[in-house]
Amino acid sequence: MRSDTFIAEHIVQPSAQAGMSVQNPYCVRYTVNGRMTARQGAMVAYRGDLTIKTKSQGLGRLLKRAVTREGLALMEVEGRGDMWLADLAKNVFILALAPGDGLSVTGKSVLCFDPSLQYDIRLIKGAGMTGGGLFNCVFTGDGSIAVTAHGQPMVIPVTPSQPVLVDTDAVIGWSGSLQAGIHRSESVRSLLKGGSGEAFQLTLQGEGSVIVQPSEGPLLAAKGSGGVADTVGEFLGG
């Protein structure tokens, strides 16, 4: 079988400029001319004179990651060349931030970002133990971030008159201008009976948008029907 057609359809073309671009629906290409930051293990291929090393995140972020299991294990890439990044063939998309913008993203959804962006790990108001211990990564600055999703994401507008509630496993990120909290839709009595699987939602209020994937992720496939035991395990990140 001749492969000319396959090669013509899938061959990588020269990059027009430095920075990130979508190579295909499941892969981001980052043309490095200096430095970039990515999730550890996200590299699927690279070429050029690039050096990869673990990125130091400071004691504060390391302590938050140890306590919350949220955040990012990062690598820093320096030099000149091209790197292709992906995560389990999830869909990828790129978001651009301008000075003054803020974007909250779940740590598991971050693929790579420009080194000009800053980030921190924050607890969702009202989360704690009963809200699933939900933490998020808040990005600010001037630059771009590549994010992954299970399937094609939806962008749902949030207004003061129309707050939005999102499953905590389906949310990807939301505008930094929004107020986030935890809503409990089931009583303790219901949880003791096994629950519906929809006990807690992230509630977003204000003016902005929320990005939602059409999936609750692979975690649900491994969940049993152990009622409260399963629920507590999920809260703790198990």
Image (cartoon, rainbow, N blue to C red):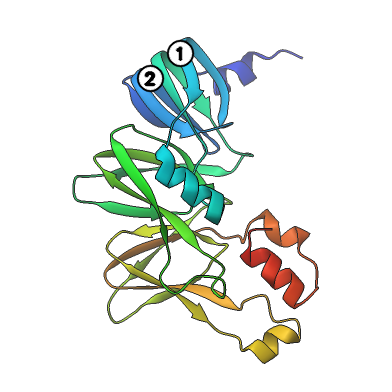
Q: Nearer the viewer, residue 72 or 38?
A: 72
Label 1 sits on residue: 50
**Location of residue 34 by image quarter:** top left
- Residue labelled with disc 2: 32
Which residue appears at 80% of the width and 73% of the height?
226
Residue 175 badge? none
Q: Position of residue 234 (x, y in %)?
A: 66, 65
Disc 2, SS: strand
Residue 227 or 174: which is nearer the viewer? Answer: 227
**Spatial separation of the CA atoms under disc 2 and disc 1:** 8 Å
Instruction: Look at label 2 and name its amino acid.
Output: Val
**Placement of the C terminus among the 4 image quadrants:** bottom right
* Residue 168 in sight: yes
Q: Give left or right: position of 74 versus 177.
A: right
Relative to 158, is 236 on the left or the right?
right
Label 2 Cα neighbours within 10 Å, binned few <14 / some 14-19 / many ≥20: many
Residue 104, image x, y percentages: 38, 55
Quadrant (top left, top right, bottom left, bottom right) of the N terminus: top right
